Amino acid sequence: MVAIPKTQKAVVFEKHGGPLVYKDIPVPTPGPDEILINVKFSGVCHTDLHAWKGDWPLDTKLPLVGGHEGAGVVVAKGNQVTNFDLGDYAGIKWLNGSCLSCEYCNNGFEPNCASALLSGYTVDGSFQQYAIAKAIHAAPIPAGTDLANVAPILCAGITVYKAIKESGVKPGQWLAVAGAGGGLGSLCIQYGRLMGLRVLGIDTGAAKAKLAQDLGTEVFIDFAKTPDLVAEVIKVTDGGPHAVINVAAAEKPFEMSCRYVRPRGTVVAVGLPKNGYIRSEIMTTVLKSITIKGSYVGNRADTTEALDFFSRGLIESPIKIVGLSELASVFELMEKGEIAGRYVLDTSK
């Protein structure tokens, strides 16, 4: 048995856009169907920035402990939990829980459940040393896994893996990743390559260009240095990519992708810019017969599959580790668009 303290360190959002308070809070107690995870590392997602600011049209709890890419060790569990033992590695995902009995849950679309619990948004998440997760939705992580490196897979990895599947793109075809140098994009490149795709990365800046190229983009385009992005994308892919995964936190890339995607191709919306819209000129949309669709986070099966790629050493998490107390500086860099890869918080610091 591991001794569980009464209090722990956490970063608390006490009001939207207010100070990020690093302080002591009580350690929660798991309910009958829950596990308590001693979070060792937590990735920082752009969604966490929106949760802090409160600028999405979705209600959040306040005060709130953000975070939904938490990797750690099970230290307590409820009496109904049968799929985890004490000492197991487990991950906290964006989808913390769902009803498991509605139309969507029954068909494998648990993220669309109207009763879904969202880590770091509607329930406290992983920016703390001990966090609660519904056992049925927590991610089993193999023993011996590097917990810092697996953390980004729990949201970013699962999300882009699901988006590629949703796109319907086939081996040998072109996949464009808009926002290729960020946390989601850097993983999307790798999953795309492993699925037999030709990957085109789109982003800006030397650091993001190098990261995307090191991870295997066949072509990288810096949109800030390209006078006609649409024409250049169509040229290098000989007609346009068969699918586009938009992970950028800006509206313009979505509109651009509808223009350069190949006829009968698919544009997948993943990134969630504030108050953003997807605009596609109707004549072009019809004549090219393109598909525009949204892709949310993955379900439990997607989680297992995405983690399996990582566990077999096929996916690299390009991370930088800083202390939990440094979350404010990570958000500052995120707002400036200066993060290549993913920041991961060490909860012991």
Image (cartoon, grey):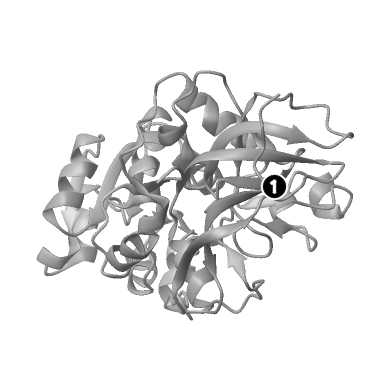
Q: Nearer the viewer, residue 117 or 17?
A: 17
The residue carrying mark 1 is 132
Q: What is the quadrant of the N terminus in the image? A: top right
Secondary structure type for disc 1:
strand
Question: Could you tell me which residue is drawn at 23 percent across and 43 percent down?
Answer: 212
User: Measured from the top left, where is residue 93 in percent x and y?
Assistant: 60, 46
Residue 8: % across, % down = 58, 50
Residue 283 higher or lower than 43, as above or below:
below
Along the horizontal axis of the image, is 271 left or right of 233?
Answer: right
Q: Is residue 216 above or below residue 16?
A: above
Corner quadrant of residue 108: top right
Residue 192 falls in which quadrant of the image?
top left
The quarter of the picture where residue 315 lies is top left
The answer, for residue 169, to whether it is visible in the render is: no
Q: Amino acid at mark 1?
A: Ile
Query: How far across and how far down the image is residue 51, in percent?
Result: 53, 69
